[in-house]
Amino acid sequence: MDKISEGLKRLQEPGLPNREDLIALLSLEDEKELEPLFLAADALRKESVGNVVHLRGIVEFSNYCERNCLYCGLRQANRQLTRYRMTDREIVDAALAVKAANVATLVLQSGEDSFYDTEKLCRLIEKIKAETGLITTLSIGERPREDYQSFRDAGADRYLLKHETAVPSLYRRFHPDSRRENRLQCLKWLKELNYETGTGCMVGLPGQDNAALAEDILLIKSLDSDMAGIGPFLPHPQTPLAACPSGEVLPVLKMLALVRLACPTINMPATTALTVLHPEGRRKALAAGANVVMPDFTPPVYRRLYDLYPGRTADIEEPSAILKKLEEELNDCGRTLWK
Ligand code: SAM
Ligand code: SF4
């Protein structure tokens, strides 16, 4: 057996993957050499989570943020961004639109915005659950354990909190006002509170080499994550990383494939950022291990202001048009939509 096949086989054994195997597989650049990796990930995806593609309808309800992550267009120091907060009624209406599209899961996302205190968020979650019954995911950053407990009591089911990068020195560099230890502590609390918990990372951050990406895979595995969002870093012009090069498609696909092999039943979206980077990004991700798509149900007037990175709002399509296109795309590759 050659070295690549040996590494792929070891990766599918129980327990933490071997760091050296991950680095060796991440270092492959040749499409022919990479073929067995993508085929193995696609086969394991089919065997462990099936041909179904799950939909999550995302509503980005506030672009205010009190943090200054170096990569993000929503960072507080970006004074050129017009800020918005959707009203409770607008948020519930957007959730009703998710339900009307037969999408079973809602993702409520925002910057770290303390305007939405625990009380306001709990009332909002209760209202959404009462009016829509949707499975409700929060993606609103780091909060105290008691807040996570209150959101859970109010009906929240899932929580997305990407670890962004597993390497302490990189984490410090990109997060002037948050600590990696706290992020990991939050992820542990969320697990303890029985949330279905998602983490994930960016790929192509300045200074992030294959050894750093291997650490991301090991962390996702050791956290026993239910979901992992893995997409390219895209430089935003109003951030300190404006002049840095974008992440690339191939390393993201390798990461998706390796995470699928290490965590067979994990849910992984084909990220919007990958589709911004490459028009075929979604199809490529779904063929490399991904099994989730997250159509955006934020009203267009706000969606164009949720400006994390350039290009994401260039082509504002109605969710119904996206779903139709998606259905056709999936039919072509033998996958089906789970709404
Ligand atoms: N504020 C919450 C948080 O940070 O967890 C949730 C919203 S945040 C905008 C959602 C995700 O956007 C982050 O986890 C980060 O990975 C991603 N993101 C932000 N800026 C990005 C960029 N320039 N390129 C790619 N992804 C980016
Ligand atoms: Fe705020 Fe999240 Fe952007 Fe960081 S990634 S600046 S916490 S919205």
Image (tube, rainbow, N blue to C red):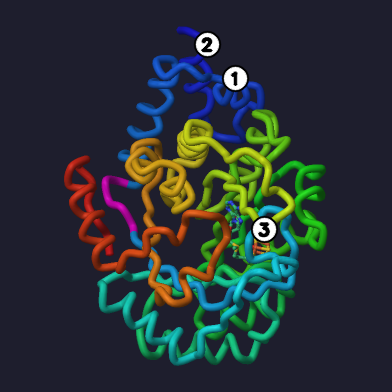
Q: Quadrant of residue 66?
A: bottom right
Distance between mark 1 and mark 2 Cα atoms: 9 Å
Identify which residue, 7 or 102, lies in the foreground.
Answer: 102
Q: Is residue 51 magenta?
A: yes
Q: Is residue 203 above or below residue 10?
A: below
- Name the mark on residue 238: 3
- Name the mark on residue 131: none
Secondary structure category for the residue under label 2 = helix
Secondary structure category for the residue under label 1 = helix
Tag in front: 1 or 2: 1
Q: 10 Å neighbourhood of mark 2: few (<14), some, or many (≥20)?
A: few
Check disc 2 and report the residue beneath it: 3
CB contact under 8 Å: marks 1 and 2: yes
- Name the mark on residue 24: 1
Q: What percent of the width, then of the height, locates residue 216?
A: 64, 41
Work out whether mark 1 precedes mark 2 in sequence or the reverse, and give the earlier one.
2
Q: Is residue 13 above or below residue 228?
A: above
Q: 10 Å neighbourhood of mark 1: few (<14), some, or many (≥20)?
A: some
Tag in front: 3 or 1: 3
